[in-house]
Amino acid sequence: MPKTIAEINRKISQGKAVVVTAEEVLGIARDRGIKKTAEEIDVVTTGTFSPMCSSGAFLNTGHSKPRIKLGGGKVFLNDVPVYTGLAAVDVFLGATALPDDDPRNRFRPGEFNYGGGHVIEELVAGKDIKLKATAYGTDCYPRKKLETWINIKDINNAILFNIRNAYQNYEVATNLSDKTLYTYMGILKPALGNANYATSGQLSPLLNDPYYKTIGIGTRIFLGGGIGHVAWHGTQHDPGILRGDNGVPKRPGATLALIGDMKQMRPEWLIGTSMLGYGCTLTIGIGIPIPILSEEILQYTLVSDAEIFAPIVEFSEAHPQGSSDILGEVSYAQLKSGHIEIHGKDVPTASLSSYPKAVEIARTLKRWIEQGEFLLTEAAAPIPGVESGMTSRMLKERPLTE
Amino acid sequence: MEVSKRIVLHFPPSIAGQPIVYKLARDFDLSFDILKASVSPGEEGLMVMELSGSQQNYGKGIQYLTEVGVIIQSLSQDIVRDENRCTHCGACITICPTGAFSLEAETRKVLFDHSKCLVCGLCIKGCPPHAMKLFF
């Protein structure tokens, strides 16, 4: 003690690394003590499986004969529009994109049965996807129309690039009004009828590395059933938020931008998702290994649901109006008990994040590392920490004047 | 032996005005709990009910319904969960008005108690990965 990542990788290559999940490590440390556990354990694996809207895929279809410039044209994949403001045959398929003829919330609540997240799931599942495109035509790219099936195994590239994933903690949503609300936090019944939450708590990657001491740019991870990397800190990254004495954020804090090759991902870990009355999104499986380089890093992974607190946010008034008022704080242990108390009322809780799937991800990553198939990476650069002063602000509107 | 089953009754326009359900109770000593009833613009009636009584009377009642032209479908398989699609997130638990979903404490997997399901359909639209499906 302390260890280095190179030393841990040597053990992984020899099939000798000791790997446990962030859930398993709790009992081990309780039995053997911090010092011994830090010496014995090399890696703690984490996992989360949640809807994450700021996700999408860059696709390069390959050039047609004759050539077409999709850039600046209109392209649809299974009727879902993709972004074409790129070179000739690169497009970006966003998880929340909807077909033009989707009725959206014209009749509330809209159903949002099929969108970008569903196309991503079907692509990864190896299904043929219908591409329809129109372009303006140039001397070098004369074609103006293209209609064809595409398949992930044939196109040049399919790169998942999610600009904000793996939120370090999240809000608990509830509703004080007398109407049902249809939100990105699920269906919220009137008059404190329920409260929904959305992280895997003690198994969640960034809650086990609260100060980003091991997770950084370049970190190799489990992403969508394949291998990906941390590309950058995510949008709205907010390391300076309120923290508990254990260092764990009590508000949504850090975020990660993640990248990976979709060709080696699995559809059971990238699931097209519909939030009634809200929209389409993608539910993503993410797992991050934490190398136990020191007792301090082990200590961080020992955080349990009872020691992680989330803010309760009201969604009929406070959230839509951009107020930062909260109704209180609750621990994940309370949330997972199925009931919390808000304003003296017993409120049933539900999760939008799958804990059993998070466990499965942490165990899968553990198995990959134990079998020597997955080596750890030294971060190329850290993600901004508390000292960076980085915050996530509300938009400052300025009137447009002539 | 007592039986209690949930069934869907389709009343064609020709018989939609007759007191069929009343006769079902009076002549066959069956009790019923209407879960849903509607009449379409074409005057076709649809009723979802839980029908209870002795096995013998239940059989006679169903026979009577069939004879007068009511089309009967079983509700026992109506809402099913696609196990491949369910992620066990738990969003359904607080949506379901009858508490048909619960968490298994050990695994935190979501259990679906079909006997509590009243086929209201709230879970179908409320399930983010669309794992709940209606089957006729």
Image (tube, coloured by chain):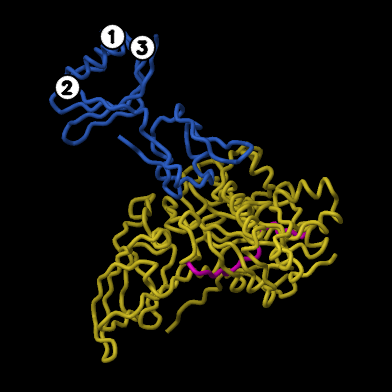
Chain colours: A yellow, B blue
Quadrant housing residue A249 = bottom right
Q: Quadrant of residue A375?
A: bottom right
- Protein chain holding label 2: B
Q: Count the labels in the image.
A: 3
Residue wearing tag 2: B69
Residue for point 62% across, 55% down: A47
What whole-number distance in Å separates the C-alpha atoms at marks 1 and 3?
Answer: 8 Å
Residue A325 appearing in the image: no
**Closer to us: A201 or A310:** A201
Q: What residue type is labelled 2?
A: Gly
- Front residue of this view, candidates A187 and A396: A187
Q: Give the range drawn in magenta.
A: A246-262
Q: Quadrant of the C terminus of chain A?
A: bottom left
Circle 1 SS class:
helix
Identify the residue under disc 1. Answer: B28
Q: In the image, B24: left or right of A401?
A: left
> Which amino acid, mark 3?
Gly
**Residue at x-position 45% and y-position 82%:** A401
Check chain identity for marks 1 and 3: say if they share one.
yes
Q: Position of residue A312 (x, y in %)?
A: 63, 50
Report which residue position mark 3 lands on: B53
Residues under labels 2 and 3: Cα distance? 21 Å
Q: Which chain carries label 3?
A: B
**In this orientation, does residue A104 appear?**
yes
For the residue marked with disc 1, what is the amino acid? Phe
